[in-house]
Image (tube, rainbow, N blue to C red):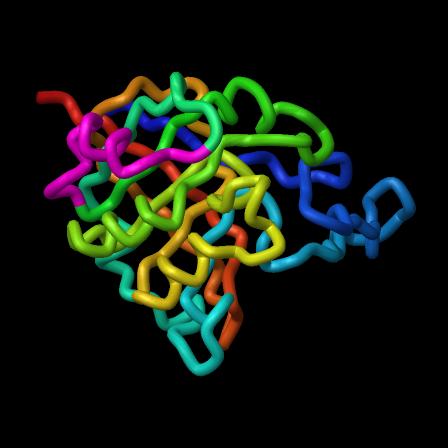
Amino acid sequence: MEIYDITLPIHPEMLHWGRKPEVEIVESLANGDASNVTRWRLGAHTGTHVDAPAHFVDGATPVDKLDLHALIGPALVVDATAVTGDISIDDLAAAGVAGHQRVLLKTSNSAGALKLPDRAESWVGLSPEAARWLIGQGVQLIGIDYLTIESHTRTDTWDAHHVLLGAGLIILENADLDAVPPGEYELVALPAKLVDADGSFTRAVLIKRDA
């Protein structure tokens, strides 16, 4: 089988929304300690991460209680690299999203905005109308290749987040799909089990098994 690691590396200079990760050396062999030990200061939404419904809905499902069946299983990587602005219903329908429970949107972000050290001025996101369409199609998890699935024009209202998380969908953000050809895979996306958290950094891989 072939494994695609779609997880962004976590380090102090990485692309991040707000304060970047910080690393403290607690113990080191070089200083005569018995081992190397570091302490990391980072947010739950650092790097490749899962947004749980609790992120935007008080009392909704937190990240440690998400259904693992939604986070592991067949997934479709959609080629949306030609899309500018918002991904629309027509874009999703034309890509054959109907009938798939886990969908990852490969956009121009993967080769562009996602590779920059700081937040871009613009990026490709998901329209609220397309978010509602995904709910009607029975999608359980939707992923995208940037800091947020929200369009850069809606980071004051967060419309797509309210639609998706309000319906109980799981959002996977910052998935690096640059080297992943569009098609069907097996997704394994396991967030850290942070109790009652709104989200968590996640190790995510796509698996293509031999026929």
The stretch drawn in magenta includes residue 79 = no
Residue 131 vs 111, above or below: the answer is below
Task: Give percent across and percent down for residue 37.
Answer: 74, 52
Residue 36 vs 80, above or below: the answer is below
Residue furthest bottom as drawn: 59
Quadrant occupied by the C terminus = top left
Residue furthest right as drawn: 31
Query: Residue 88 sits in which quadrant?
Result: top left
Task: Give percent across and percent down for residue 90.
Answer: 24, 32
Judging depth in this view, the residue of 26 and 161 nearest the camera is: 161
Task: Give percent across and percent down for residue 123.
Answer: 55, 31
Can the viewer see residue 36 in this picture? no
Q: Residue at x 25, y 45 (%)?
A: 102
Q: Give the range drawn in magenta.
A: 86-100
The stretch drawn in magenta includes residue 91 = yes
Q: Residue at x 70, y 39 (%)?
A: 11
In the displayed structure, does residue 26 sit left or right of residue 9? right
Q: Which residue is drawn at 43% across and 62% down?
A: 162
